[in-house]
Amino acid sequence: MKVLVIGGGGREHALIWGLRRSSSVTEIVAAPGNGGMGGLARCLPVDVNHLEAMVNLVAIERPDLTIIGPEVPLALGLVNALEALGFRVFGPTMEAAQLESSKAFAKAFMQRHAIPTAEYALCTTLDQVREALPRFSVPVVVKASGLAAGKGVVICETHLDAERTAAEMFSGVLLGDVEAEVVLEEFLTGEEVSFFALCDGRHAVAIAAAQDHKRVGEGDTGPNTGGMGAYSTDGLLTPAMQQWILHNVAQKVVDGMTSEGTPFKGILFIGLMMSPRGPMVLEFNTRWGDPETEAIVLRLETDLLDLFHAAIDGTANELTIRLKPGASATVIAASGGYPSKYASGKAISGLETPSDDGVVIFHAGTAVKDGQLVTAGGRVLAVTAEADNLRDALDRIYARLKTISFEGMQYRRDIGHRALQYYADGE
Ligand code: AMP
Ligand code: GLY
């Protein structure tokens, strides 16, 4: 079977690594792929912001299955376009992907289907913001409705600050794009957990829980990034809590979307706040997380290809998704300066000799230039391991990181710190 994977980050490298372990996969094409995929996949250039270019590529390559990694192609309607041409494709349609691409849609959907989430107000003008604000205590959360690559959420300490932030979103100053809708939201406290469910339009089944570290600095400080590391352990959610989330969130999403005529097929990535009032949905993503996927794939015992087929065929309920017991983690080695301005093209050393420590290095932003592996993005490598417990997985990752270098390389030395503290305090 020939599989084509759209995307070129650590998530896609991890998915391709997982697919390579499936005996039915004979050929993988990655578009655009990255410098670390050679040997696993044939990489072809494509602009993932350009619908027609992606459709043309699939039409030429004629894969048996296309898997879409990033959110932008989903929001552009790549699944709709490929299905219309008769191709087999994994991911939600443009309509179903609105759960991620429009916070306004997601909030109203959750309200319609009684899915637990923070109180909110949807505003399309600054006057509406001023009118709604007195309903919210501070801090109050101001969110751009559209896809904003993690930069569209601002926690405001005063109403005046919230008004100013909303004004900046409406004017395009804050995000570079004029935001038509702004969501004001009640500020929630608690631990954040992500939960991944496989959905097939009828059923939602659990894959794994994970937690990522969005801030660039240790101790969860500094600006937001795409994610500086993540981990997945058995202890993140109890089996009872997983069941609760499956029943009260994931299955309600699947049932609700089907009843509204826009069935959801694909990965539902639920961002949750474990608040004093119970688990509350912070956001939905309609794809695998990055870097959560890197950590999860290492624990996955079920054939990854079976997951994709089950979601497409509506048979997810017949699938047993097995994870290796224990824990896995991934730590991102990023370019100096990221998430602000950073340089690319820096030679990477330390990856030449494979090690026998079980550490898997997924490439997030690399390229090969004149035979040399160089940096080609903000997040460069996702150094990943799985073990009986989180401490062992992290020790192996950090030992391996010491042997890797490129000019300006930065990484957080405290990935998993909350879980480690929790275990240290005694469960
Ligand atoms: P989102 O893109 O909606 O997940 O928001 C990004 C981050 O902002 C989340 O991971 C939270 O840390 C924070 N956040 C979002 N919404 C809220 C909220 N209602 N209360 C507190 N923190 C929030
Ligand atoms: N790690 C967060 C995301 O993939 O959006």
Image (cartoon, rainbow, N blue to C red):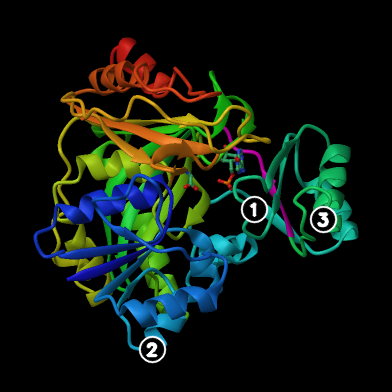
Mark 2 — residue? 85
| Quarter of the image that includes the N terminus | bottom left
Residue at the front extreme, as displayed: 370
**Residue 148: mark:** 1
Residue positioned most to the left:
23
Q: CB under 8 Å between callouts 2 and 3? A: no
Residue occupying image coordinates x 19% and y 46%: 300
Q: Residues within 10 Å of mark 3 (few under 14, many from 20)?
A: some
Helix, strand or loop at disc 3? Answer: loop
Mark nearer the N terminus (2 vs 1): 2
The structure residue drawn at horizontal position 23% and vertical position 18%, both measured from the top left corner, is 392
Q: Residues within 10 Å of mark 2 (few under 14, many from 20)?
A: few
Q: Secondary structure at mark 2?
A: loop
CB of mark 1 near ligand 1 (< 8 Å):
yes
Instruction: Give the main secondary structure, helix, strand or loop, of the magenta stretch.
Output: strand
The secondary structure type at the circle numbered 1 is loop
Can you identify the residue that label 3 sits on?
Answer: 172
Nearer the observer, 389 or 223: 223
State the separation of the CA atoms marked 2 and 1. 30 Å
Specify the amino acid type for callout 1. Answer: Ala
Is 186 a magenta residue?
yes
